[in-house]
Image (cartoon, grey):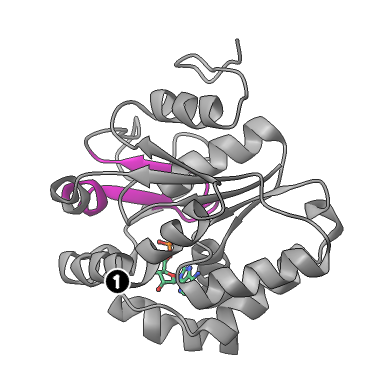
Amino acid sequence: MRILLIGPPGAGKGTQAARLAAHLSIPHISTGDLFREHIDQGTELGQNALTHIRGGFLVPDEVTTGVIKECLARPDTERGFLLDGFPRNLAQAKALDGILADSESRLDAVLDLEIPEDQVVSRIAGRRLCRQDREHIFHVDYSPPEVAGVCGFCGGELYQRDDDREATVRRRLEVYRTETAPVVDHYQAQGLVTTISALGQVHEVLNRALVAIGRGQVDASGTSS
Ligand code: AMP
């Protein structure tokens, strides 16, 4: 399956994308994670991306689309993929349409995660990521690690993202409203969008996503039924 996951900052996109992709055995491609890897490795692309990410702005389209084009050319994406955080504006959506048309493939579903804006800042302020594996995401209140500051999966150090500070989050929300929301309309016109509430337990949101794409269900432990 070829799926897009769209949603404002704080909707739990990264958490859901990782679980959904694992459940469907398809690669999880997150542009945010790819940029953070480049930043950690000190590449030129990473340095360039960081100046935009720090301010809560989008990384320029030519950089972002180049990164995605490279990913979608990999053989492991032939049988499907889950894109998390791309496309984030109409130009990127049109670029993706072109990449897919060139490979004679098409999207199966676009999942639009919805969350009231007043929940966003508190959700993001408490978010902590694992330095060793970015797919391991915690929240100091809603999904705390057993030992503060330590990843319960691999023992890695937990940290707060640079762009998760309140002023930057507000800028990211503004960018979402003006640039990313029109992407949902673009795919709505193609009949691909299902809107899903991002409220509730992680497995409840995951089940809404699975129902939307016509797949099974999981229980609270993540086991399929
Ligand atoms: P995320 O991890 O998806 O929240 O992304 C973190 C930051 O990376 C965003 O706030 C943007 O600055 C940048 N970014 C991620 N994906 C994109 C994209 N598709 N286009 C432009 N910038 C992006």
Instruction: Give how far across and how far down residue 64 sits, in percent.
Output: 57, 77
State yes or no: residue 123 in magenta.
Answer: yes
Name the one closer to the observer, 36 or 214. Answer: 214
Quadrant location of the N terminus in the rendered image: top right
Whether residue 18 can be seen here: yes
Amino acid type assigned to the residue bearing label 1 in the image: Thr
Q: In the image, what residue occupies the spot 66% across and 80% down?
A: 66
For mark 1, what is the residue?
178
144 sits left or right of 224 in the view: left
Q: Residue furthest left?
A: 118
* In the image, residue 62 above or below residue 153: below
Q: In the image, what residue occupies the spot 48% across and 56% down?
A: 131
Q: Which contiguous range is marked in magenta?
A: 122-140
Taking the image as four quarters, which one is ligand 1 found in? bottom left
State yes or no: residue 1 in magenta.
Answer: no
Quadrant location of the C terminus in the rendered image: top right
Marks counted in the figure total: 1
Classify residue 163 by image quadrant. Answer: bottom left
190 sits left or right of 24 in the view: left
